[in-house]
Amino acid sequence: MVRCACRVASISLVIGGLIAGQGQTPLPGVNLDMPAEEAFLYRHVPDVSVRLRSGERVYLSQLWARHPQLIVFVFARCTGICSPLLLSLRETTEIVGGAGEEYEVLVIGFDPQEPPEQLEQLVRRAGLSPPRGWRFAAGESETLHQLLHAVGFWYRRVEGTDQYDHPGVIVAVAQGRIMRLHVGGAISPSALRAILRELRGDRVLNYPVPDARIAFRCYRYDPRTGETRLDWGILAMWLPSIIGMSIAVLLFIISHKARGG
């Protein structure tokens, strides 16, 4: 019942955000394109400081030195994408596990006027308690724009409201570099597992969308579990070589016997 109510609330927030999005006026110099992952992969992330809920001022390098970071940008008053994205990430990290051990989630408020406590209230409004392995921080106005620019995040004021228009972005950072950039209002367990494998330095296989026209594949990849297994395609690939070698061996034996006779 709680999760059902959370989803209903999230849908309401999205609808509200769409309604509020009418009549927006873009701010000068704002790039309103959705961030393209390939344009930002392996870029260095500026080692800027943020303010934690405790009031402590820490640099991002202090955090990614301990664990890879999944960085999410939100603002506490958001009636649009922020709550659904955090809710999706919370549910997905519960399914996948490892938060606080393999990686950490860092929720950064891009409105410097909002303290970290307000970001936690945003999470609670979505029906969640502050999860293990999550941190809430406020960006500092002096350096925040450097961080946002480096990862392709933008925002603009919605005219006549206290809202901002902005994309939903999760930035996966390991040792100060962008390893993955997930754009959207939700994240699936398979997408998060792929991101975590990338953060660990594991090989991440691309897999095609299931298609009845593809009769044979060398490997089959299960995006739900991240496991791969051999398929009939590997036999089809090696079969001509096996047949050719068998024929060559057979001809050699026949020729050898013929000479002996």
Image (cartoon, rainbow, N blue to C red):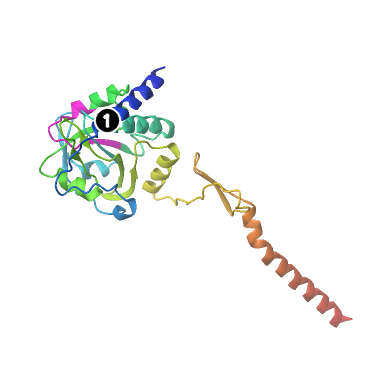
Q: Amino acid at mark 1?
A: Ile
Q: Determine the residue located farthest toward the left in the rendered image.
A: 142
Residue 9 placement (x, y as % from top left): 33, 22
Q: Residue furthest bottom?
A: 259
Q: Could you tell me which residue is drawn at 17 percent across and 28 percent down?
A: 54
Q: Residue at x 18, y 35 (%)?
A: 158
Looking at the image, which residue is at 30% across and 27% down? 13
Rendered location of residue 10, percent (x, y): 34, 26
Q: Which type of secondary structure does the marked residue at label 1 adopt?
A: helix
Q: Quadrant of residue 125?
A: top left
Q: Residue furthest front?
A: 23
The quadrant of the picture occupied by the N terminus is top left
Please state the extent of the stretch shown in magenta in the rendering. Answer: 105-119
Q: Which residue is mark 1?
A: 19
Q: Quadrant of residue 238?
A: bottom right
Q: Position of residue 34 (x, y in %)?
A: 29, 47
Check the picture and name the quadrant holding the C terminus: bottom right
Residue 26 placed where, x, y %? 18, 43
> Who is closer to the viewer here, 211 or 115?
211
